[in-house]
Image: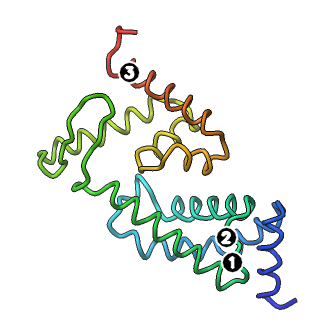
């Protein structure tokens, strides 16, 4: 079987829910995705998000969307690679913006917008450390993932699609996260 034919057939099989075909695509493209991510991630701290995270996230979203009937225009390995590369670049760009000190922090409960570039470097480091501590306080990988996606600017609908959950489930998880963080930030008030 010609290599392009097999990749084309794997794309079709993934659309039909074939996990083995998804695994074959994964095996074929994961290393290449990681290489491309590494080339584009020089300005992102690896402790928070590395090329493996970018490649995993890209492939997972692609797989879910193919299974859900999206990307009907993807017909062969060239289309697939172009789509994966576009998704990867967007994810990395989004992450770089998120981690940029120039990004404005938005807080949901009455705190005015703060420009991180106006804060002293020690305040930015403390803010980053506080965010990491709040994420760790969730003590649940599912809640951590939802919180991180929300920090990255995803809507509730996008989070639901990414995690294969309902929008209502994501809303409940966000409410639970808020409750946990409220108790963490204001002990003894709940």
Q: Tell me where residue 87 appears, x and y as whole percent.
A: 53, 69
Which quarter of the picture shows residue 190? top left
Q: Are marks 2 and 1 in contact (CB under 8 Å)?
A: yes
Q: Tell me where residue 178 appears, x and y as whole percent.
A: 43, 26
Quarter of the picture containing the N terminus is: bottom right
Q: Nearer the viewer, residue 69 or 48?
A: 69
Q: CA distance from mark 2 to mark 1?
A: 6 Å
Query: In the picture provided, is 179 more to the left or to the right than 75?
Result: left
Residue at which label 1 appears = 74
Front tag of 3 and 2: 2
Residue at which label 2 appears = 71
| Residue found 34% across the figure and 38% down from its top | 131
Front tag of 1 and 3: 1
Residue at which label 3 appears = 182
Question: Which element carries disc 1, helix, strand or loop?
Answer: loop
Q: CA distance from mark 3 to mark 2?
A: 40 Å
Q: CA distance from mark 1 to mark 3?
A: 45 Å
| Residue found 32% across the figure and 55% down from its top | 99
């Amino acid at each position: 079987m010609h290599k392009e034919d097999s990749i084309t057939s794997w794309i079709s099989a993934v659309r039909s829910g074939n996990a083995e075909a998804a695994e074959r695509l994964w095996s074929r493209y994961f290393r290449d995705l990681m290489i491309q991510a590494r080339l584009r991630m020089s300005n992102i701290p690896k402790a928070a998000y590395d090329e493996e995270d970018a490649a995993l996230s890209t492939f997972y979203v692609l797989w879910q969307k193919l299974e859900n009937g999206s990307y009907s225009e993807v017909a062969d390995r060239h289309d697939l690679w172009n789509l994966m590369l576009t998704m990867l670049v967007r994810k990395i760009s989004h992450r770089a913006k998120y981690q940029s000190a120039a990004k404005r922090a938005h807080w949901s409960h009455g705190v005015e917008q703060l420009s991180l570039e106006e804060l002293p470097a020690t305040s930015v480091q403390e803010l980053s450390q506080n965010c990491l501590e709040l994420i760790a306080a969730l003590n649940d990988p599912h809640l951590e993932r939802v919180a991180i996606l929300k920090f990255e600017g995803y809507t509730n609908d996008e989070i639901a699609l990414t995690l294969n959950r309902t929008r209502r489930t994501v809303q409940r998880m966000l409410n639970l996260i808020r409750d946990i963080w409220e108790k963490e930030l204001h002990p003894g008030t709940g």
